Amino acid sequence: RATGVKATTIRWYEQEGWLPPPARTAGGHRAYGAAHLRRLGFIRHARELGFESDAIRALLDLADQPDADCAKAHALATSQIAEIDARLARLAALRAELVRMATSCEGGVVGECRIIETLADFAHGHCVDASHGAMLR
């Protein structure tokens, strides 16, 4: 509860080796300590920042080596920045296309609606920038 991470997710983290197995109570319940809490917070924050599983695993490995060079952490962060920039560019293209579609429709009947016509053209012939089709992949 302290980290906002669901129990099923915590168990998955344990299975993946991201979280060390906790001690068990006499009744067999998991007993997490402060180190678990810090590590769960680390993982959750990395997820919030959009890091993929492989990058989180690498960052966790680095976090376990406080005297290691942080060049790999820097490389992972700059790679994540580049991915975010690429997503922003794709979203900007989507927005521009939607604005263009919406402004080309001034009401009337559906049979003459440019929005419906453009959406029906899955080959993107009516689109100014057909690159948004690649965003679904």
Image (cartoon, helix red, strand yellow):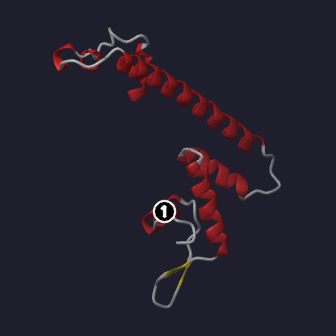
Q: Residue at x 42, y 10 (%)?
A: 128
Apparent side of residue 99 relative to residue 30 in the rendered image (left or right) = left
* Crowding at mark 1 (Cα within 10 Å: few <14, some 14-19, many 20+): few
Q: Nearer the viewer, residue 126 or 57?
A: 126
Apparent side of residue 65 relative to residue 18 in the rendered image (left or right) = right
Does residue 35 lie above or below 68 as drawn? below
Q: Position of residue 91 (x, y in %)?
A: 49, 28
Q: Residue lying at the far bottom in this picture: please name it.
A: 26
Helix, strand or loop at label 1? It is helix
Q: Position of residue 90 (x, y in %)?
A: 50, 25
Q: Residue at x 67, y 71 (%)?
A: 35
Q: Position of residue 8 (x, y in %)?
A: 42, 65
Q: Nearer the viewer, residue 34 or 65?
A: 34
- Count the numbered circles shown: 1
- The amino acid pointed to by label 1 is Gln
Q: Quadrant of the C terminus?
A: top left
Does residue 42 lie above or below 130 as drawn? below
Q: Nearer the viewer, residue 69 or 50?
A: 50
Quarter-of-image position of residue 136: top left
Residue with the mark numbered 1: 15
Q: Residue at x 18, y 20 (%)?
A: 110
Does residue 52 lie above or below 137 as drawn? below
Q: Nearer the viewer, residue 83 or 91?
A: 91
Determine if residue 90 is in view: yes
Quarter-of-image position of residue 107: top left
Does residue 18 lie above or below 124 as drawn? below
Q: Residue at x 78, y 45 (%)?
A: 70
